[in-house]
Image (cartoon, rainbow, N blue to C red):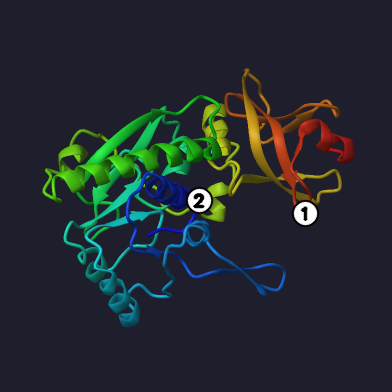
Amino acid sequence: MGTPPFAAESLRTLVEDGYSIAAVVTAPDKPVGRHGNTLQPSAVKQYALSVGLPVLQPESLKDETFIRELQRYNANLQIVVAFRMLPEIVWKMPELGTFNLHASLLPQYRGAAPINHAIINGETETGVTTFFLENGMDTGKIILQQQIPIGESDDAGIMHDKLMTLGARLVERTLEILILADGHISALPQHFLTETYEVLHPAPKISRETCRIDWTKSAAEIYNHIRGLSPHPGAWTELTAPKGEKLPLKIFQSEKIFEKHSLPCGTVISDGKKHIDIAVSDGYIRLQSLQPSGRKRMNAKEFLNGTKL
């Protein structure tokens, strides 16, 4: 059960390694295009159809027709990767249970956007976790975990791809263990781990306001904020043009410059040719890759060629 490429990678790994997949559950096709006249299947559906797997696309996971159809497949195990919360009648259905792959080291970063929030918070390590589903968001007993470092320049896109590959391997290892043990394994309740952390960081869905840059923060905090939202959905700000109009701007890459100054936070300094620096509390943020509203992504030099600050 899953929708995006992150989930499709786990499905591909299991199929190519010879596991028997009874059926795939994914989201309904999404309307795309200017008028929404074209339906775009999910990455999971596209791969499933390419290898001849049955695909279920319920509007509601509580729909009785869907539940009866799912029961007919009589699967002994269900795997969830990047999907909606399942109702109890669904996750309790298979004899060996239902497990989920989550892109964090639970119990840290429970929620919809663990990769983004880990980078935004300046973490130097993250990972993937498989756990049994139960009532509650990402709270079930932990089966396996695998750690991975977050590099100083790694953004959310880079870590997404690393964790996607790492997660697919962990799904396969988890499946092997459950099959060998016939589902009877000793999984770890998360409350044993929560006691080892002073603070548990949540990972709620990213909103537009989450993406707005606060220039009063430190250079390191803003740098992490930008890379934690790159390339999607993108951190944003507004530049004030010479005549006072606001220019919305997404920022995808930046550089930290630690230097004392007395400028108000948010002051823009530019040589008009290559560099755009924004004053922050302990230095500057140099903009490297950005995108003005309605235009393509570009570097600072390309931006300055067509824009006066």
Element assignment for label 1: loop
- Distance between the alpha carbons at the discs numbered 1 and 2: 27 Å
Residue bearing mark 1: 294
Q: Is residue 165 above or below residue 273?
A: below
* x and y percentages locating residue 103 in the rendered image: 38, 43
Q: Say which quarter of the image contains residue 181.
A: top left
Position of the N terminus by quadrant = bottom left
Position of 264 with respect to 194 (left or right) is right
Position of 225 with respect to 138 (left or right) is right
Q: Is residue 11 above or below residue 74?
A: above
Position of 96 with respect to 237 (left or right) is left
* x and y percentages locating residue 261 in the rendered image: 66, 21
Three-letter code for the amino acid on which mark 1 is drawn: Gly
Q: Say which quarter of the image contains residue 66.
A: bottom left
Tell me if residue 200 can be seen.
no
- Front position in the image: 262 or 49: 49
Residue extending farthest to the bottom is 65
Q: Is residue 264 above or below residue 191?
A: above
Three-letter code for the amino acid on which mark 2 is drawn: Pro
- Front position in the image: 237 or 306: 306
Residue bearing mark 2: 5
Measuring 77% from the left and 33% from the top, which residue is drawn there? 300
Q: Is residue 265 above or below residue 9?
A: above
